[in-house]
Image (tube, rainbow, N blue to C red):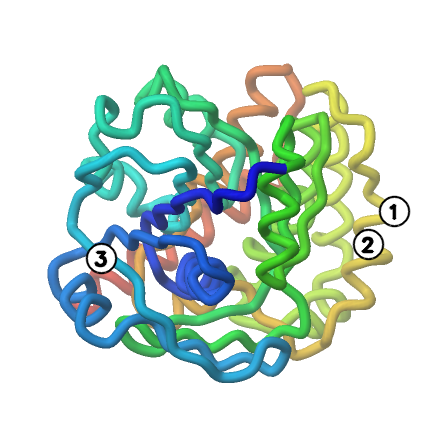
Amino acid sequence: MSTAKPTVAVLGPGGVGGLIGGLLARAGHRVVCLAGERTSAVLRQEGLHVESGRHGEFSVRVEADTELREPVDVLFVTVKATALAEALDRVPAEVLGGALVIPLLNGIDHLAVLRGRFPEARIVAGTIRVEATRTAPGRIAHTSPFAHLELAGPVDEFAERLREAGLGATVREDESATLWEKLAFLAPFALLTTRYRADAGTVRDRHRDELLAVLDEIEAVAAAAGVGSVRAAELLAFFDKVPATMKSSMQRDAEAGRPLELDAIGGAVQRAGAAHGVPTPAVDRLVAAVAESAGTAAGTAA
């Protein structure tokens, strides 16, 4: 492995991006955070401050700007799907060049967007299991005992850099399976908890038939898309093990009146089902109900 540590840019230094950037900066990497003017100003002045039960409490200096102005080795894209289009304007393709790009977004459709936007870059599918929240600009609360990435591609050297920084990192070959295996749990979890404004325990106890119907549909769509590792029975067993009080990020966004990743999560299943001729009536009903509820809430807020 090269002794030089890669320079890393983080597009969207919120809970996930801030944690990754903070750990890499603490490990000696040059980290450039890309964000709005207010957040960038705070980061330039105060750096990143992380509170983590696993990694302790620490502060690190990072660079920050509203736009990428020089090449980097790696770019993490850690914004919400709803903010992706606007955020990408901070990264000129001619500046990014052939960098390694690791998007940690929900859904499956963003890879095509990124590959179209950055044709010279090396786009690698990625997912992360973590609970981390931005409590204020530059301040990150890491509340889970884990932060584990799965990367689909020839990135063994950089994965080792992530491990050295304290992050979990697994390298896989199949990018479709990597993304679908996360979406297969996330979609029913997000849609049902948001539709019923209920935690995981309530969903699996009171809405179990609907949960089973959604899991069956997602297994069928994933199989039609060529991913045979998504199995409804295994997903249900995992769902039954998560803490009863667990809420989805979509549910929290709905409660706070923030934009929902409904299209990136539920819409991704619908589009894949339509493309492969697999009906998804249970998913369709949930997407419609959540969209109606969000529209009503927005109208009330207005």
Q: Is residue 302 left or right of residue 167?
A: left
Verify CB contact (< 8 Å) between mark 2 and mark 3.
Answer: no
The amino acid at mark 3 is Ala
Crowding around mark 3 (Cα neighbors within 10 Å: few <14, some 14 to 19, many 20+) is many
Viewer-side residue, 127 vs 41: 41
Label 3 SS? strand
Verify CB contact (< 8 Å) between mark 1 and mark 2.
Answer: yes
For the residues labelled 2 and 3, the Cα–Cα distance comes to 42 Å
Note whether 146 is above or below 116 in the view shown: below
The amino acid at mark 1 is Ala
Q: Position of residue 230 (x, y in %)?
A: 78, 36
Residue under label 3, please give it.
Answer: 64
Crowding around mark 2 (Cα neighbors within 10 Å: few <14, some 14 to 19, many 20+) is some
Q: Position of residue 265 (x, y in %)?
A: 51, 43
The amino acid at mark 2 is Leu
Q: Is residue 184 left or right of residue 255?
A: right
Is any atom of residue 265 visible in this view? yes
Q: Position of residue 40 (x, y in %)?
A: 18, 62
Question: In the image, which is nearer the foreground, mark 1 or mark 3?
Answer: 3
Residue under label 2, please give it.
Answer: 236
Question: In the image, what residue occupies the spot 22% across and 57% down?
Answer: 64
Note whether 275 is above or below 57 in the view shown: above
Label 1 SS? helix
Note whether 99 is above or below 241 in the view shown: above
Q: Hey, which quadrant is residue 192 in on the image?
A: bottom right
Residue under label 1, please give it.
Answer: 233
Question: In the image, what residue occupies the spot 55% across and 43% down?
Answer: 3
